[in-house]
Image: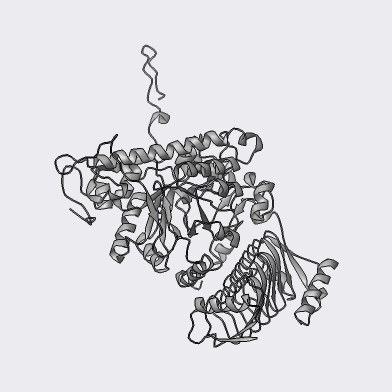
């Protein structure tokens, strides 16, 4: 394992060094990452990068090959547009983790902000902690797994793919155009394999699946405004 | 007492229906009836149809005693155009400053996309893929390929970046600024759905905002990412609809882009709420003026390329846009008309007899790719020739040498809007634009 001190490096310079080391078949640990943006952008080389600290925005964006492990927290948009490989975040991730994820695996051992998996198209995004609102919004494929609490807008306008949740209150937090369903045996097996691989103590049979409907918002009808004369009649203009 | 009709003459009494109805014209009535019947707003193709200021409100001053004209038929006028050289190491070199704007495969047929791509190869220019991915045949046939990075990222991946000669980070389009893409179910066939990863036949209202850049600060970091991914070679543009042009352009420049595509209110689309097309944004000509002024104020006019789109029809529009300060124009509806589109405004329905705005296999047969490609190429050649004719008459040996001093406003409105002096005077009403 090689060590790279990023204290005086720019994100771009660090990535040049990382590519060089991975290209030579060396795994690398990055010290003093000081929440740098764009670590690991688009790397195609195989191998492992460990970031001994926290990262800024776009960690592992468009990643296509290596495994990146962040021992601290990751900023917004971790693993955006990721193509393949692995991004492991040991603590928490900011908003929009895994947005437009194409393929590969992202594992976040802590929680995330809003909109994890926004528009994701494939791959796996596993969030072991809580997730903010609008998780899996407009998902086009892949699987999003949330083992902690979920917030409002879950699965809003999901087109394809599936969101697995443990939160028993998930049904009351659903966005539009999706429904809660049971897991198939195949899904349970596949998820248990995933949990085993990443050392996550969870039984897949305890989860429920949020799946897309092909009607509703996917037909051109207006959902707003919902005009409710009865509520207007009871509204007190002085108290709100 | 009832009205007595005089049967001895042919003269009929005036009736209510014969009187002009002011704002209650046929279009207004049709829109009210549509809402009354359906409880929703109407979706329509092509964009705004209302009267808006256009480049027709400007004229070009020919050279006479003050400058020599250039021979229309015997002397050259250079049209070669370089775009996106601010930071990118491989800027775009085009033979004519006419780009084919982003129109998606899905909104348009496969045949239409291929024909337009072929036209760019015949004329040495660039085509943008639009939303929904890149048809391999488009890339194979295009001279230069622009790839849009849209909020939906439908059909987009890292492979798209690698196919690009130019990137467009799309924030908005002139026909429906502030709204996301629409593609109605009739056009989401199995083929289109597969490319976009969508269920077949749904009415698509695509993603409203970029999920990987919530605001300009994030976009600055995103630009670094895109530069790294493209090895700093590919020019990166940002496409914005004309709105708060001054502020939007300043922010766009600060994100570090190589150029800006500014889409005015007359921009076309395959489907948009009529309300949006007719009421959102500002027209192309005043938007361009504001953008140029802003780039000049920032001192980056020579380094940031500016492409203007939205209702560009002919060489006169192009020449006037270049004179104001654009580096190139983008055409959309014009290219479709060249292929046979009649601007019926019904693109959203997917029933296009010309085989352009349809996915119907039978209707698609009506578009013969090579013939359509030749027509679009001819249109681009003809537009270029028109602009050259005007430029030479104004004494220019290069299209890019057209300048504001070559223009005059025909109306008080265009004068006040552009800051270009009114014909017959050297007076400007409002803020003068660079000279007086």
Residue situated in front as seen by the camera: B211 or B176: B211
> What residue lies at 34% left-to-right and 58% top-to-bottom?
B291
Q: Examine the image and state in which quarter residue B64 appears.
A: top left
The answer to which of B5 and B332 lies nearer the viewer is: B332
Which residue extends farthest front? A24
Percent coordinates x, y for residue B153 in the rendering: 58, 59
Relative horizontal placement of residue B330, taking residue B406 as reference (left or right):
right
Q: Is residue B305 above or below residue A12?
A: above
Q: Is residue B126 visible?
A: yes
Pick out the residue farthest to the top.
Answer: B8
The x and y percentages for residue B123 are 45, 42
| Depth check, front residue: A196 or A156 | A196
Q: Quadrant of the N terminus of chain B?
A: top left
In this rendering, does residue A221 appear at all? no
Of residues A78 and B80, the one nearer the viewer is: B80
In this rendering, is residue B257 above or below B424? below
Q: Is residue B215 left or right of residue B69?
A: right
Residue depicted at x 43% and y 53%: B280
């Amino acid at each position: 394992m090689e060590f790279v001190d990023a204290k005086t490096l720019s994100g771009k310079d660090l990535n040049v060094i990382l590519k060089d080391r991975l290209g030579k078949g060396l795994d690398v640990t990055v010290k003093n990452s000081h929440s740098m943006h764009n670590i690991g952008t688009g790397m195609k080389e195989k191998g492992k990068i460990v970031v001994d600290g926290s990262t800024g925005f776009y960690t592992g964006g468009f990643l296509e090959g290596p495994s990146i492990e962040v021992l601290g927290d990751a900023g917004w948009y971790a693993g955006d547009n990721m193509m393949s490989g692995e991004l492991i975040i040991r603590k928490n991730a900011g908003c929009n983790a895994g947005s437009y994820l194409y393929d590969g695996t992202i594992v976040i051992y802590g929680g995330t902000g809003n909109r994890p998996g926004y528009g994701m198209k494939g791959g796996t995004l596993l969030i072991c902690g809580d997730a903010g609102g609008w998780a899996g919004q407009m998902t086009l494929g892949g699987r999003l797994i949330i083992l902690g609490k979920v917030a409002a807008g879950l699965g809003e306008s999901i087109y394809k793919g599936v969101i697995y949740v443990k939160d028993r209150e998930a049904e009351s937090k659903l966005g539009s155009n999706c429904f809660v369903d049971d897991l198939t045996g195949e899904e349970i097996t596949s998820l248990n394999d995933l949990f085993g691989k990443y050392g996550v103590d969870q039984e897949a049979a305890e989860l429920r699946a949020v799946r897309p409907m092909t009607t509703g918002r996917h037909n051109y009808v207006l959902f707003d405004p919902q005009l409710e004369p009865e509520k207007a009649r009871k509204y007190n203009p002085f108290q709100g | 007492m009832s009205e007595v009709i005089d049967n001895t003459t042919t003269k009929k009494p005036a009736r209510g229906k014969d009187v002009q109805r002011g704002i209650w014209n046929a279009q207004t009535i049709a829109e009210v009836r549509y809402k009354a019947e359906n409880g929703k707003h109407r979706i329509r193709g092509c964009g705004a149809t209302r009267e808006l200021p256009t480049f027709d409100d400007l004229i070009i001053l020919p050279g006479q005693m003050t400058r020599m004209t250039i021979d229309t038929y015997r002397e050259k006028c250079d049209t070669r155009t370089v775009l996106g050289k601010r930071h990118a190491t491989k800027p775009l070199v085009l033979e004519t400053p006419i780009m084919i704007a982003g129109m998606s495969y899905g909104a348009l047929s496969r045949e239409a996309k291929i024909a337009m791509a072929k036209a760019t190869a015949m004329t040495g220019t660039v085509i943008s893929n639009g939303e929904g991915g890149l048809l391999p045949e488009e890339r194979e046939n295009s001279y230069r390929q622009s790839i849009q990075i849209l909020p939906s990222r439908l059909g987009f991946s890292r492979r798209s970046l690698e196919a690009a000669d130019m990137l467009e980070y799309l924030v908005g389009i002139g026909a429906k600024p502030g709204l996301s893409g629409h593609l109605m179910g009739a056009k989401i066939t199995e083929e289109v759905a597969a490319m976009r990863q969508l269920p077949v036949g749904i009415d698509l209202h695509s993603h409203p905002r970029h999920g990987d850049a919530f605001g300009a600060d994030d976009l600055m970091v995103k630009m670094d990412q895109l530069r790294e991914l493209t090895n700093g070679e590919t020019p990166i543009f940002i496409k914005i609809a004309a709105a708060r042009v001054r502020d939007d352009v300043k922010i766009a420049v600060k994100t570090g882009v190589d150029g800006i595509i500014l889409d005015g209110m007359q921009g076309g689309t395959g489907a948009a709420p009529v309300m949006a097309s007719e009421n959102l944004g500002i027209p192309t000509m005043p938007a361009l003026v504001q953008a140029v002024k802003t780039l000049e104020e920032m001192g980056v006019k020579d380094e940031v390329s500016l492409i203007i789109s939205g209702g560009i029809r002919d060489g006169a529009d192009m020449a006037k846009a270049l004179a104001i300060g654009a580096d190139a124009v983008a055409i959309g509806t014009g290219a479709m008309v060249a292929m046979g589109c009649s601007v019926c405004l019904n693109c959203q329905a997917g029933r296009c007899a010309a085989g352009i705005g349809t996915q119907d296999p039978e209707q698609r047969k009506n578009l013969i790719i090579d013939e359509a490609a030749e027509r679009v190429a001819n249109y681009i050649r003809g537009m270029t020739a028109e602009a050259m004719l005007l430029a030479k008459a104004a004494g220019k040996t290069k299209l890019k040498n057209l300048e504001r001093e070559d223009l005059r406003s025909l109306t008080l409105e265009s004068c006040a809007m552009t800051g270009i002096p009114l014909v017959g005077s050297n007076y400007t009403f409002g803020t003068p634009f660079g000279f007086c």
